[in-house]
Amino acid sequence: MSRRCNDERGALSTFVAVIALAMLMAGGLALDGGRKLAALQQASHLADGAARAGAQAVDLDTLRTTGEVRLLGDQATIRATDYLASLGHTGQIIVSGDTVTVTVSLSVDPVLLPIGMITVTATETAAAVTEEPG
């Protein structure tokens, strides 16, 4: 005769619930982590493109008279801002000498993880040049 032990009743259900929760969290990390990385890459591309657009605002008068590469600060800022605006984004733009630095922040709403909005920030710099690199 076999006797059933009532002490372990429902233990399998608890185990399945814990494993299911762990799998859901692992899936959330993979999915939402991937979305965060994609947003970071997009922010980097936006900042890079805007910085390069701004770095095209070379002060030609200074370049021709002194050979020094300088940017027209207002024009560089406008070009970078227009680039971002054409793609539906904004950013912080700093023009210094012959370089433009652009910082872009994007927000991502997680799909599975209950952690609230994720914000990523990327900063890229471009320098004005007067000849082909290489």
Image (tube, helix red, strand yellow):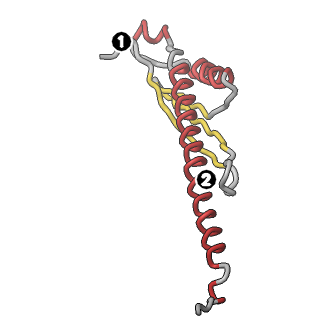
Q: Quadrant of the C terminus?
A: top left
- Going from N to C along the chain, the mark reached first, 1 or 2, is 2
Foreground pick, 10 / 22: 10
Query: Which residue appears farthest toward the front when viewing the image?
Result: 1
- The residue depicted at 65 percent of the width and 55 percent of the height is 113
Can you give x and y, in whole percent of width and height, for residue 107 in the image? Answer: 66, 42
Pair 1/2: label in front: 2
Picture quadrant where residue 72 is located: top right
Say which amino acid is labelled 1. Glu
Tell me if residue 42 comes above or below residue 10 in the rendering: above
Q: Quadrant of the N terminus?
A: bottom right
- The residue depicted at 60 percent of the width and 17 percent of the height is 75
- The residue depicted at 42 percent of the width and 7 percent of the height is 65
Foreground pick, 42 / 57: 42
Foreground pick, 2 / 76: 2
Tell me if residue 26 comes above or below residue 47 in the rendering: below
Picture quadrant where residue 12 is located: bottom right
Say which amino acid is labelled 2. Gly
**Residue 16 shows which numbered tag?**
none
Dot 1, how many residues are within 10 Å of its Cα: few (below 14), some (14-19), or many (20+)? Answer: few
Can you give x and y, in whole percent of width and height, for residue 23 in the image? Answer: 58, 59
Residue ID for mark 2 = 28
Residue ID for mark 1 = 132
- Label 2 sits on a secondary structure element that is helix
- Label 1 sits on a secondary structure element that is loop
